[in-house]
Image: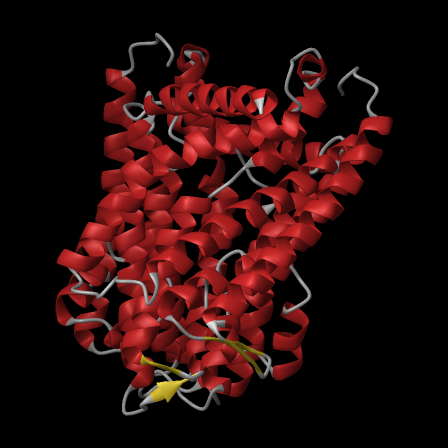
Amino acid sequence: MNRLKHNWRICRSVAAVTYKEWSAYRTHSLVSVIVGPVYFMVQYFIWTAVYGGQATLGGLDLQQMIRYFGATALIGYLIMDFADWNLSMLVRTGKFLTFHLRPVDHRSFALFQKLGHRFLGFVFEFLPCLLIFILIFGIDMRPASLPWTIVSVLLAFLMNFYVNYTIGLTSFWLVQSGGIRSAFMLVSGIFSGALIPLDFFPHWLQVTQLFLPFQYIAYMPAMVFTGHYSLGGLELSIPEAVGMQGAAVLVMFGCNELVRRRAMKQFTAVGA
Amino acid sequence: MKRYVEVYKQCMYSAVQTASAYRMNFIVSSLITLIGNILFPLVTLLIYRAGTSFPGWSLYEVLLIQSVFTMSSGLSSLVFGGVMWTTMSHVREGSFEVVLLKPLNPLFYLVATTFSTESAGLFLGGAALFVFSAWHVGAIPALAWLQFAGMFFAGTAVLAGLSLMMAAMSFKWVGNSRISELADSVLSVGKYPLPIFPKAVQAAATMIIPVGMVGFLPASALLGRVGASDFAAILPCFVFLWAGIWVYRHMIRLYEGVGG
């Protein structure tokens, strides 16, 4: 119990310090207040034109599609992460060594940092954009089920972190993981469902996505938000979908732990 | 003038030499850029695969717009792509004086020394998609090619102007690595047929921030879909480039050299 309390205090302190540190650059977050609505506006007109006379596309009607893109944009602000870049930098410069001297392991530290950083995102990106979507675009941004949406977004948050951290761990072998990072961002951008709902992909590719981490980062929480999840012929109720997402996060955590242990054996502490 | 050409040639040579020194990084970066470009029109492909379309536009016509957009981005990025990041870095570190001390126009110096060889992949990826889509849209008359060339360079001027404006912004918005996202978001309008947007957006995208000239209008010229009024949009493109240069030079004068 004491240990749990101790860890909670560390988490709170790291998150609070990160929040304060990044608050100095809060106007950087405010870029999203312009960028998010512009991208959303483009998507709005693209899909309004594409729907034309069609009632549904990929199993979604126009209103659901607009809500889907609104949700993916907003969820993106809550789960955004660059743990891979950060870890890669620490390994390359040799600064990772200092984390071995601290009474908290680097992965937990990075996760707590992300919590603080994204709380800032919640205040300066999520809330303003939510208001813009509701008040200017007139989009109904009420989730089908608020509790399940919160759980799903939290799981997406963890999934994104563990995936990115695993990518960052490759730096222990490659030193510079920029190439892998770019490749991953490219693939993730497409298969996470942030550009287009995964229902539009060929059936075999949809089935493949069930076994890859990408859909659990954006597509699944967005579909939980809309209240309807189906992929590759698999129709799940919202609790079932969130359960599957939870299982996927556990598997990803296991993979991350495996790679992390191997990476620690590889660490030479001299930097590049 | 001759001296400037010589300096530029030398900088290009250095950039190529640098790329060959880190050739693995260069090959991987170029490959990722190339693959990224192949995947860029994926959304369009999936939309058409679902049996729907942008009203009045066939798949290959939309791909043509997107390929022209990519080629224009590649060309602009090759020449002007590094100016923003280098300016931002100098301003943040307070080392812009080093640029100002060079016996050359500071803007020219930055443009020349940031020649971005990795962007060749972007241009080539766009060119490959361009050949593929142009092949499928039918015969294109010689006059249309001429109109296309003029509009293509006007579109590249818009991108250059936008790069310079973003770079100029970094003098005041110190260390904000997200400035480029502002330009990217505005440019996303130029990747699709303009008629799908409301009239106000169309007007803004041709006359105020002429991003329509980056992909849509040059492709429309090839397809024989431009009217006389569309050519009037060429002028704002060069005005936009001039505005970018003016704003950048103005911001240099405001530079105080204290770092961020």
Screen quadrant of the N terminus of chain A: top right
Is residue A119 visible in the rendered structure shown here? yes
Q: Nearer the viewer, residue A231 or B56?
A: A231
Q: Quadrant of residue A144?
A: bottom left
Please report the residue visible at 39 percent of the width from the left and 73 percent of the height from the top. Answer: B219
Q: Position of residue B151 (x, y in %)?
A: 34, 64
Quarter occupied by residue B228: bottom left
Q: Quadrant of the C terminus of chain A?
A: top right
Q: Position of residue B126 (x, y in %)?
A: 54, 64
Q: Nearer the viewer, residue B106 or B46?
A: B46
Residue reaching furthest to the front: A1
Colour mode of the rendering:
secondary structure
Report the number of discs: 0
Judging depth in this view, the residue of B117 and A53 nearest the camera is: A53
Q: Quick check: B88 above or below A61? A: above
Nearer to the camera, B222 or B41: B41
Q: Is residue B72 left or right of residue B243?
A: right
Extreme residue toward the top, this view: B258
The residue shown at (50%, 46%) is A157
Name the residue at 68% across, 72% down. A208
On the image, the x and y values in percent for residue A56 come to 36, 87
Image x and y of residue A193, in percent? 50, 65
Q: Is residue B103 visible?
A: no
Query: Is residue A175 positioned above or below B45 on the image?
Result: above
